[in-house]
Image (spheres, rainbow, N blue to C red):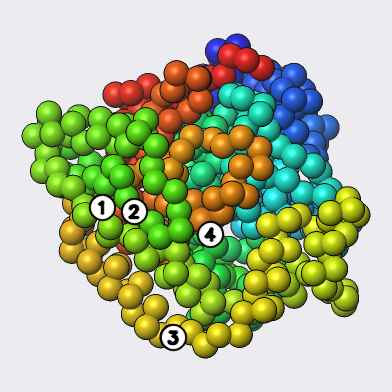
Amino acid sequence: MNELLTLSATDLAKKIANKEVSPSEVLEIHIQRITDVNTKLNAMVETDFERARMRAREQDDKLMAADSPHDLPVYFGVPFTVKEMFAYDGMKRTGGSVHHKRDVMNWDATLVSRLKNSGAIPMGTTNVPELGFWFETYNRIYGLTKNPYDLGRTPGGSSGGEGALIGAGASPMGIGSDIGGSIRMPATFCGIFGHKPSQFLLPFTGHFPYSREDIKNILVGEKYPYTTMGPMSRKASDLYEMMGLMMGPDGYDQSTLPNVRLKPKPQDWSKVKVVICPDPVFHKARQTDLELIQVVKNCGKLFEELGADVVELPQRFFVRSAELWFAALNKTKNKNFYEVLRGPDQEFSAMRELFKLVMGRSSYIFPNLIVSLAEMLDTKPKDLEEELRALQKMRDDLHQIIGDNGILILPPHPRVAPKHREPLFSPFDFIYTGIFTTLGMPATSVPMGLNEEGIPLGVQVVANYLNDHMTLGCAEFLEQTFGGWVPPTNL
């Protein structure tokens, strides 16, 4: 693999600024890698190579005219990729839904625009599940995305195309979104870094299926979605840099926090409180496999040897997480799920579509039909307020346990990347990551090497609200200690 395909976006930008390599050279090497691997992975679904080449040539000229590297934007000449659920001028935003397969955007999502303004060059969009609602990346428009470490396994979802492409070394960084672990599961399964920020740090503007006017006028107050935007990268240091570039209000998303900056990353980890939960119990989810329990324990041992205060969280602390996650989403939803699934002005019967699916004729994927059917049949009264109070208590308890100078380390999933379709048999495994989205807490997926089969292992690092610097700093520290991303060798 070419050395440039193994560098961080920050290091690529430095090489470009120092005129060791041109933007066009960096771009062409990544385009060639995409071309080589995408026939196997089906990760990139729409390319923007010609416009990318045009931008790179323009930047070649600017680079030669620049008097100093300091005159250039931070990611000048660095390529990146975009999850297909973000608005990207001139590109489709289908959300994997057949009802939106002709939707072409004429504007950029705020995060896409901010990365462009930093000098980065978008190369295209990456695959998602239908409506972004599943942790297997498959839809009826683009098909199935595969894992770069084992083509028989899923890259996760819903940012599975991003995870697969970055994990394959074909993109240094990208933009994902996360409501149940949609950044962190693909990052874990594909051996890369992914960060779900504290809620309200990054603008939601441009995310499927909303317009800018929707963001400004509809998604306010209790109706603001839990979906959180975030960075994904092959190297840990880019997460912190990308967060700094993408944070802050944009004039549309009224919930984005103003005047917030990332705090400095910890320098002395012996003074940090470390809470570990190697084998958590989540109602309805599988128990954690031993190899993932062990990598959490390895982290605890590392910090103990440094002299840090390491404590273990009770195994059943998160046992009710699935119920609390669903309660939180129920509070914010503007429409029933089946209304979103069916598309505008479309007749829809989940039962009829299930029969059509058996005959190979449905336009929808199986998990979404099951969710729609359950939602329409479920008429039992629920004590939503009781569940929301329990969620708040969990948030308060974690704040007290972790503190403002602490982190929590636990598995991001009960097993390594599953085989294709296996998630259907354990659909609640997402809750290992999902609970922290509804808690609003920052959480970062960190690769921890490969298992005996060559499949990525990982941990999830969590901190209290607005303490993103703690999880991002820990990701860099663990990368330095355990090696971070290991490029796949089977592509």
Residue at image point 66% right, 37% down: 420
Q: Earlier in the sequence, mark 2 or mark 3?
A: 2
Q: Nearer the viewer, mark 2 or mark 4?
A: 2
Left or right of 384? Residue 129 is right
**Residue type, mark 4 in image:** Ile
Task: Please name the residue that numbered disc 2 is placed on.
Answer: 281
Tell me whether circle 3 and circle 4 mark residues in contact (CB < 8 Å): no
Q: Position of residue 207 (x, y in %)?
A: 66, 60
Q: Nearer the viewer, residue 84 or 259?
A: 84
Q: Residue at x 32, y 32 (%)?
A: 295
- Residue 408 x, y percent position in the rendering: 27, 49
* Local SS, label 1: loop
Per the image, the residue denoted by label 4 is: 179
Mark 2 to mark 4: distance in Å?
20 Å
Query: Element type at marker 2?
Result: loop
- Residue 142 in percent (x, y) is at 81, 43
Q: Which mark is residue 41?
A: none
Q: What is the crowding at mark 4: few (fewer than 14 residues within 10 Å), some, or many (at least 20)?
A: many
Q: Which residue is mark 3?
A: 383
| x and y percentages locating residue 154 in the rendered image | 62, 37
Instruction: Categorize mark 1 by other alpha carbons within 10 Å: few (<14), some (14-19), many (20+).
Output: some
On screen, 20 above or below 351? Answer: above
Q: Report which residue position mark 1 lands on.
A: 315
As shown in the figure, which amino acid type bears the numbered disc 3?
Asp
Q: Earlier in the sequence, mark 1 or mark 4?
A: 4
Dot 2 and dot 4 residues touching (CB under 8 Å): no
The CA distance from mark 2 to mark 3 is 23 Å
Q: Position of 325 compared to 139: left or right?
A: left
| Residue contact at pointers 1 and 2, CB within 8 angstroms | yes
Q: Nearer the viewer, mark 3 or mark 4?
A: 3
